[in-house]
């Protein structure tokens, strides 16, 4: 009985170590996210040389940067209702001549200037929600959809159309982007 209690206590004590993500500086995390997205996009493009691939990562409240995803995979954690605060998007294709620009609508700020080709759009460390987004492919056509506070995945938008909400004070919590 004592041995079982000690084993249980040991397992419970180790739980926070297993469940707690590693803490890194903002610069280290930003550089790692950018390098990972570039690598993912290049790997996906290499698998299908004639194809253009889009990869993206989001920064989520209380969770930080989530792993990058590609080609219509879900970024964010909408089932937990966590707000997206920032996004990075990268496009790669072996034929070259492709890119992406995107502009976020931010809480208490509104629309801000475009970011392009894997640069940060939004904020980190400010708890400022990303409420809407416009994305435009350069040399390729991109489509996307998003869900958020009080709404399910919206109708598909493409090439610089607005996704999310403006003027309603609602956050985006999930996004999917793909080459159309």
Image (cartoon, rainbow, N blue to C red):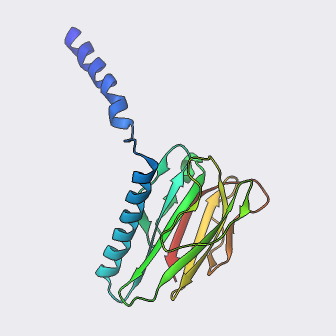
Q: Is residue 171 left or right of residue 55?
A: right
Q: Residue at x 28, y 25 (%)?
A: 11
Rendering coords of residue 27 (x, y %):
43, 53
Whether 92 is drawn above or below 176: the answer is below
Residue at the limit of the structure toward the front, as seen here = 27
Rendering coords of residue 87 (x, y %):
54, 62
Residue at the limit of the structure toward the right, as seen here = 167
Please indicate, yes or no, whether residue 27 appears anywhere in the rendered image: yes
Q: Residue at x 49, y 74 (%)?
A: 117
In-front residue for pair 27/128 = 27
Q: Is residue 19 left or right of residue 83?
A: left
The quadrant holding residue 101 is bottom right
Please indicate, yes or no, whether residue 1 appears anywhere in the rendered image: no
Rendering coords of residue 166 (x, y %):
76, 63
Q: Is residue 7 left or right of residue 69?
A: left
Residue at the limit of the structure toward the top, as seen here = 2
The quadrant holding residue 52 is bottom left
* Number of marks in picture: 0
Residue at the limit of the structure toward the left, as seen here = 3
Task: Specify the quadrant that holds the N terminus.
Answer: top left
Whether 3 is drawn above or below 120: the answer is above
Q: Residue at x 59, y 55 (%)?
A: 123
In-front residue for pair 128/8 = 128
Rendering coords of residue 93 (x, y %):
39, 84
């Amino acid at each position: 009985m004592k041995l079982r209690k000690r084993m249980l206590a040991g397992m419970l004590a180790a739980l926070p170590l297993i469940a707690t993500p590693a803490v890194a500086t903002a610069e280290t995390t930003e550089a790692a996210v950018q390098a990972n997205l570039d690598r993912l996009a290049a790997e996906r493009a290499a698998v299908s040389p004639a194809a253009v691939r889009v990869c993206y990562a989001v920064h989520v409240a209380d969770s930080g940067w989530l792993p990058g995803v590609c080609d219509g995979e879900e970024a964010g954690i909408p089932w937990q209702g966590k707000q997206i605060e920032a996004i990075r998007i990268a496009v790669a294709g072996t034929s070259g001549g492709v890119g992406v620009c995107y502009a976020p609508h931010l809480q208490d700020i509104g629309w801000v200037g475009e970011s392009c080709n894997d640069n940060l759009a939004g904020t980190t460390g400010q708890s400022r929600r990303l409420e809407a987004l416009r994305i435009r492919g350069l040399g390729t056509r991109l489509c996307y959809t998003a869900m958020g506070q009080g709404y399910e995945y919206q109708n598909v938008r493409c090439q610089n159309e607005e996704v999310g909400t403006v003027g309603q004070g609602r956050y985006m919590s999930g996004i999917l982007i793909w080459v159309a």
